[in-house]
Amino acid sequence: MKQVKQIVVALLLFVATTSFVNAQSKVAHIDVTQLLAAMPEMKAAEAELKKLQETYNADIQASMTELRNKFTQYQNEAASKSKEENDKRAIELQGYEKNIGEAQQAAQQEFQKKQAELFAPISEKAKAAIEQVAAAQGFDYVIDAQAGGGLIVAKGKDLLPDVKKQLGF
């Protein structure tokens, strides 16, 4: 009789443990930043962005050099010019400075736009690959391993409807 009890208890523990393990969601993690950095498409996009940044910087540096040259020229000629002429030149230099500032802002906006344009398809490709691997290996959740990283794949049970029902809305 004692042996039968032990067998029944062992069988119950086995069934309970198996049920508990099967009920667990499978969770994995990935460092998305490291993945993106390793992708050849990302390296090509970064090279293209670097080239674009260098072009913008060269244009702005040329404008700054031109502004400095005009400033030096106007400063050297200031003593021989009238006050009205010097005031006009000062306003002209301020206009150049303003134009350079606007050009810098426009370059920054264009750079960000190009960056988003280049990185979006790469990000989507990485996300699709993560989802495919997660599905193939049976993972319900994939979390970004970076500090502050979020959930990438969520195929487990969503508790929102049940919690709303519990709260009465």
Image (spheres, grey):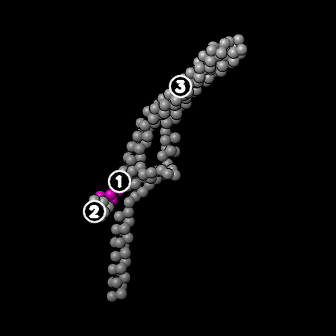
Q: What is the number of the mark on residue 168?
A: 2
Q: Magenta residues?
A: 155-161
Q: Indicate the quadrant containing the C terminus: top left, top right, bottom left or bottom right.
A: bottom left
The residue beneath circle 3 is: 103
Using the numbered discs, state the Cα–Cα distance from disc 2 to disc 1 in whole angstroms. Answer: 25 Å
Using the numbered discs, state the Cα–Cα distance from disc 3 to disc 2 in whole angstroms. Answer: 56 Å
Q: Amino acid at mark 1?
A: Lys
Please, is residue 6 above or below residue 167 in the view? below
Question: For this rendering, which residue is in front, 24 or 110?
Answer: 110
Please, is residue 70 above or below residue 129 in the view? above
Q: Indicate the quadrant containing the N terminus: top left, top right, bottom left or bottom right.
A: bottom left
Q: Residues within 10 Å of mark 2 (few under 14, many from 20)?
A: few
Dot placed on the residue nearer the N-terminal end, 3 or 1: 3
Dot placed on the residue nearer the N-terminal end, 3 or 2: 3
Q: Say left or right for 111 vs 14.
A: right
Q: Amino acid at mark 3?
A: Ala
Question: For this rendering, which residue is in front, 124 or 41?
Answer: 124
Measured from the top left, where is residue 105 in percent x and y? Answer: 52, 29
Q: Say left or right for 145 vs 71.
A: left
For label 2, the SS is: loop
The residue beneath circle 1 is: 155
